[in-house]
Amino acid sequence: MARPAAVKKVSNNEIVAAALRKAGRPLTAYQVLNALKDVGVSGPPTVYRALDKLIADGRVHRLDSLNAFVLCNHSHDNDAAAFAICDDCGTVSEFSTAKLAKDISQWAHKAQFEVASANLEIHGRCSDCRESA
């Protein structure tokens, strides 16, 4: 007699990452929570723990100016993350640059400042919004 296939439980981290991926834009923790109510995620602590773990794993970034979270779209081995945020439509474009990371590192060394993290957030208007204005 054949055994039923084992059901693989999806972690809360993966559920939260999937919600961010599906949204395609930054979401606050409570927006993530609202998106996940149908799959049984019902408490803010669950979402915050998952977001903290995803950030620690380098899979999600927190955008301080928006108090929101966005999936990382590439690795940041020796570079710093930077985000261009459109103030009109809310799109976020992530990019990284080794030069920015080098400049931050050199400044920190001179200032004897220990950098814990570095994300640059640039606000403005994307090309689509500029064209439609």
Image (spheres, helix red, strand yellow):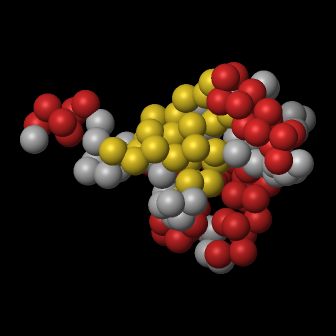
- State whether residue 69 is above or below residue 93: below
Q: Position of residue 42 (x, y in %)?
A: 62, 75
Residue situated furthest left in the rendering = 133
Residue drawn at (14%, 32%), measured in percent from left and top?
131
- State whether residue 74 is above or below residue 125: above
- State whether residue 131 is above or below residue 55: above
The reply, left or right, for residue 20 in relation to residue 10 is left
Residue 39 seen in this snapshot: yes
Q: Position of residue 121 (x, y in %)?
A: 52, 46
Residue drawn at (32%, 51%), measured in percent from left and top?
87
The reply, left or right, for residue 12 in relation to residue 126 is right
The reply, left or right, for residue 22 in relation to residue 53 is left
Residue situated furthest front in the rendering = 110
Residue drawn at (33%, 45%), measured in percent from left and top?
124
Residue 35 seen in this snapshot: no
Q: Nearer the viewer, residue 117 or 103?
A: 103
The image quadrant where one finds the N terminus is: top right
Q: Nearer the viewer, residue 124 or 23?
A: 124
